[in-house]
Amino acid sequence: MTTAQTPASNVISEARDPVFDELDFPTDPDNLYTQTVAVTLHAAELLDLRHRVRIICAQPKNEIMVHFPVRMDDGHHRLFKGYRVQHNNVLGPYKGGVRFHPEVHLDDVKSLALLMTMKCSLVRVPYGGAKGGVKVNPREHTPDEMQRITRRFASAISPFIGPDYDIPAPDVGTNAQTMAWFADTYMMSQPQSNTQDALRIVTGKPVEFGGSLGREKATGQGVVDVVVEMLPEFNLSIEGMRVSVLGFGNVGSWAARILADMGAKVVAVMDHTGGLRNDEGFDCDALAAHTAKTGGVAGFGQDAGSGSGQNTAQGGQAISEDEFYQTPVDVFIPAALEQMIKHRQAAMMNCKIVAEGANSPCDPSGDRELQRRGIEVLPAILANAGGVTVSYFEWVQNKSCVIWDAEHVDTELNRHMVMAARRTRLARQRFKCDMRTAAFAAALEHIGKTYDVRGIFP
Ligand code: NAD
């Protein structure tokens, strides 16, 4: 049954939940944190969750802000601002990525930390939720400067994290190399500790340095696992299925490559450098190689001098942002930044399913428009939970000094993703709501039960 056929409750209740006033929340409707808490409280209402669990989940436990100076290559120093938000650890150590981006703000980091709490609960990995970030544009710095920024940030937050307390990972603007610098810095500051233990301070490390096979592609693989599990509801099959991908970084490019390998056609892509369309389906491995080399999808398959807008055998036709959203597809995968799908974009989209690779890619107006149009949204806390799941596998391997083979990682990841998808589907049937609310309800119920058995100190 699709959302269009379901008597769905609104994604976000129009009325302001009394918890907002009790906790003195801002009234700004565009605030991402307020929006994420609104979805959480809406699900809590359906569950009739205890008041004490609602107020706990509505605010992070700890919000850490640091400022640190870093020497640039030309000798001058710049001061950077960084955050680590630890939302909740009732299910296990805090866990969540670190983002390097010029638009990192505290409320966005809080929102992403809350999503991590829900995500870990939904896929049943024994972690709580956290998120970090540094306000920096990695594209404006040399690798040497990025290494020093990473090491100073790691050093600044190291008193607040730990291999069994709070475990960072990569996110937008960070990668396995960033995690290697981060882990090395932490290990240098703990010379007395067992090296193997200190290695667990971050996940998403390079395979040569304690990383897990399959971690790099894990989030994209998880998106695909969820899509495959849900496809029968839409009478769709992977073979020949048309897909568009917004953002062609880690998540987007891996989801695209895996789907193309399985027989789907990735017909439209867009990133910060531009949009491309190819109705025959892109060679996604070649597109990923081009993006790694040039920094974006623009110019793919175009010989020097052929100009943009040319349709080449390997490449595609350059398209505008509106044309990208309007391209007819079965599955649309947002895998760029937050809040890119507003009402305007949602009204243009021509798809059956949105599989959220990115966190919070839809704002409430976009969400409502997709729901009104009967477009099913597979929410981020379900669809992109593959990354944290394989991060957990990496942490387990480091902790027990074993190495899993790639097949074992894929099998275990698939098991977690399929079970989380089924949990979400069951919650949707039980509460007759949209998928996003259902996923939050399934996650919150587990958290609520844990608080019931643990009780609240003192
Ligand atoms: P990334 O830095 O590898 O890629 C980000 C992509 O977004 C790039 O292709 C970039 O060009 C594109 N982009 C940026 N601004 C854009 C714009 N204005 N228009 C179009 N495209 C734009 O990041 P990532 O790791 O792939 O993360 C993408 C999303 O997935 C984020 O929301 C992140 O929080 C989420 N996520 C990532 C992981 C992970 O394991 N990496 C896990 C869970 C969720």
Image (cartoon, helix red, strand yellow):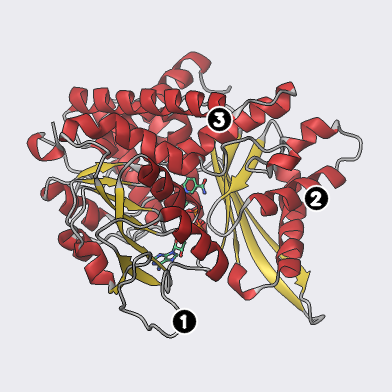
Q: Position of residue 49 (x, y in %)?
A: 33, 26
Q: Name the residue beneath numbered marker 1.
A: 304
Among the two numbered marks 3 and 1 on one chain, the one whose residue lies closer to the N terminus: 3
Instruction: Tell us which disc is closer to us: 3 or 1.
Output: 1
Q: Secondary structure at mark 1?
A: loop
Give the image quarter of residue 311: bottom left
User: What number is the disc on residue 127?
Assistant: 3
Q: Position of residue 162 (x, y in %)?
A: 72, 37
Instruction: Tell us which disc is closer to us: 2 or 3.
Output: 2
In the displayed image of the protein, which residue is found farthest to the front?
313
Among the two numbered marks 1 and 2 on one chain, the one whose residue lies closer to the N terminus: 2
Where 92 falls versus 338 (above or below)? above
Residue 407 visible? The answer is: yes
Q: Secondary structure at mark 2?
A: helix
* Amino acid type of the residue tagged 2 in the rendering: Thr
User: What number is the disc on residue 185?
Assistant: 2
In the displayed image of the protein, which residue is found farthest to the top?
453
